[in-house]
Image (tube, rainbow, N blue to C red):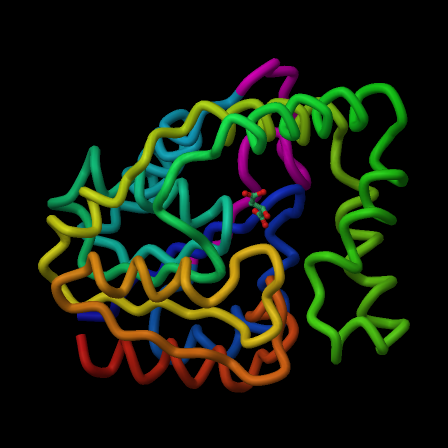
Amino acid sequence: MRHTLLLIHGFPLDATLWAANTNALRTAANVIAPDLRGFGSHASNDVCVSMEQYAHDLHALVEERRAERVVLCGLSMGGYIAMAFVERWPHLVEGLVLCNTRSTADSEEAKAGRETTATDALQKGMGVIARAMAPKVLGQVSRQDPDRVAQVEAMIARQAPTAAAAAARGMAIRPDRTHVLRDFHLPALVITGDQDELMPLPTSQAMVDALPRGHLQVLKNAGHLSNLESPAAFNAAIHGYLAAL
Ligand code: MLT
């Protein structure tokens, strides 16, 4: 039976994050790449959206598509949501790919930073957030490419401030989910970029160490958005993982 691959985007982005992946991955799986609540084409006025709420939305989508089991692939905030999904519906998950993410909760300092991000998004607008974030999410190599920078800035700038604020607040209250990884006994893939400055390599290694059957793939010349910065290597990694499932 064909796999169903659910791609879960990061913050504050939308499903176009996966533009260079979906077609290439469709040869191996039915691909679902939704906009999360409030992002992209999805309107919402939530004040705070927890990772559990996003996972709940995705569960409804999986039911609607009548997929029996899914392979979850989440990048950064998408990874936090994937772990919340695994915790609640482990029987529906046949595979897990965690990209540029971490299983631990925010520090008190990081939580305070989330509220600043939320307030900035609401008061200053997404253009300000986009200009500040784009250089941080791209690796040193991608940062030299003006088209790449413009693509990521535009993706962030077009998101609704309310969605960014709600997601930032939701990330601040997420719990540590390392235990979810310890209890995940199926093969799992952890992907990161060697130039990811937001989630340095030890955070990926810690997840691999927690996973009973975790495998680490580090993509060269890629930063925090490894799927977009190094699509060929990313797609090959997912193909290899799906083939071995
Ligand atoms: C993301 O890319 O989703 C964010 O960097 C996640 C975070 O801020 O923790």
Which of the pair 105/181 is nearer the observer? Answer: 105
Which of the pair 159/185 is nearer the observer? Answer: 185
Q: Residue at x 25, y 50 (%)?
A: 67
Q: Residue at x 90, y 72 (%)?
A: 146
Picture layout, residue 6 above or below residue 146: above
Q: Is residue 58 magenta?
A: no
Q: Is residue 41 magenta?
A: yes
Q: Residue at x 61, y 43 (%)?
A: 11
Say which quadrant the C terminus sits in. bottom left
Picture layout, residue 191 above or below residue 210: below
Which of the pair 236/32 is nearer the observer? Answer: 236
Picture layout, residue 42 above or below residue 100: above
Left or right relative to 16: residue 97: left
Whole-percent x, y for residue 161 in the image: 76, 27
Magenta-highlighted residues: 32-48
Left or right relative to 45: residue 76: left
Left or right relative to 108: residue 91: left
- Quadrant of residue 160 within the rendered picture: top right
Left or right relative to 70: residue 127: right
Whole-percent x, y for residue 116 in the image: 72, 25
Whole-percent x, y for residue 222 in the image: 61, 76
Say which quadrant the N terminus sits in. bottom left
Whole-percent x, y for residue 84 in the image: 31, 37
Total marks in image: 0
Q: Residue at x 27, y 65 (%)?
A: 208
Question: What type of secondary structure mainly makes up the magenta span?
Answer: loop
